[in-house]
Image (spheres, rainbow, N blue to C red):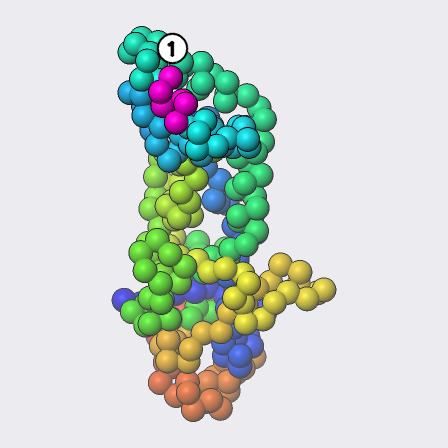
Amino acid sequence: MKLYKYFGDERSDFFNHRLIRFTQPTALNDPFEALPSFNGALDEDVISDIKYGRVGNKTKKAIATSDESVTDSRVRELRRKLKRMSNRERAQFAERMSASYQHEGWEARFKGKVSEYTKTIGMLCLSEKRENLLMWSHYANCHRGFVVEFNGDHQFFKRGTENEYYNIKKVLYSKERPSRSFFNMTYFDVLFTKSIDWSYECEWRMIAPLAHADKEPNQDNPLLYLFKVPADCITGVVIGARSAQILSDIIVRSIQSDAELSHVSVNRARVHETDFAVSIE
């Protein structure tokens, strides 16, 4: 599988150091990145637990968060109380408990929890396509930049397991925005879900903790976290149709001067003679 990264011409030094950015969700160009809608503090599992007289892990977590003095003895007391109730009484109790969590304070805590988490991670965003006209315009400085081709089957993209860091995964495009409750903050699927309006990007993503970056931000670039890419993970480069000759010269010279990159192919994009397209030569 081939995957592609679009670069602006200001990144002409990429082949000298092979550092690539893992971008914080809030620094991406979609304001909905990693931002599920809030659908309440409690999810249906907790409400169901209460209705049927159970006190599962999520319910205990909800109780403990609302009352830090909660103890095992209080959980046992709640179980006994629920068992003494009729089905109707338990349903009413569940409704009252659910209502008590539906206030602005919980939504603010939810947003704070999301914000804190997204500050700690970065996303490498790649595409299945190297000829997309919009992506050349948006991410490669109006066709003045270049596209790097990667071997998507390389171990660099498969160091984690399913739903963990360092595991490349295809983005799901959906008409429905993900929603979460405060006590159901499973998050990886949210990071890989975008509006269907972005489907033309055919995106794949890999998540990494920013603390693992090979090069951390400095005063000039306070949000730039860079990770080293293995040379044998890179398989090719396509230079943009509007790129200056100096960009081509820099890239070719960098590749030719590094024996580890001797396998990398160099191609050029050209404006198609008859179609709304670029051809790769």
Q: Callout 1, which amino acid?
A: Gln
Q: Main secondary structure of the magenta part?
A: helix
Residue displayed at 31% across by 17% down: 83
One can see residue 160 in this view: yes
Return the x and y of residue 93 as percentages of the image width and height. 40, 13
**Looking at the image, which residue sits at the far front?**
73
Front residue (pair 75, 248): 75
Residue drawn 35% across the image and 53% down it: 163
Q: Is residue 14 magenta?
A: no
Q: Quarter of the image holding residue 50?
A: top left
x, y percent for residue 125: 43, 58
Callout 1: few (<14), some (14-19), or many (20+) C-alpha neighbours within 10 Å?
A: some
Which residue is painted at 36% across and 23% down in the image? 79
Left or right relative to 80: residue 97: right
Residue 219 rendering spot, x and y as whole percentages: 72, 64
Residue 84 vs 223, above or below: the answer is: above
User: Split into 4 quadrants, where in the image is the C terminus?
Assistant: bottom left
Q: Position of residue 156 (x, y in %)?
A: 37, 71
Q: Circle 1 sits in a helix, a strand or a loop, which is it?
A: helix
Per the image, the residue denoted by label 1 is 92
Q: For the N terminus, which image quadrant?
A: bottom left
Q: Quadrant of residue 261?
A: bottom left
Question: What segment carries the magenta color?
Answer: 76-81
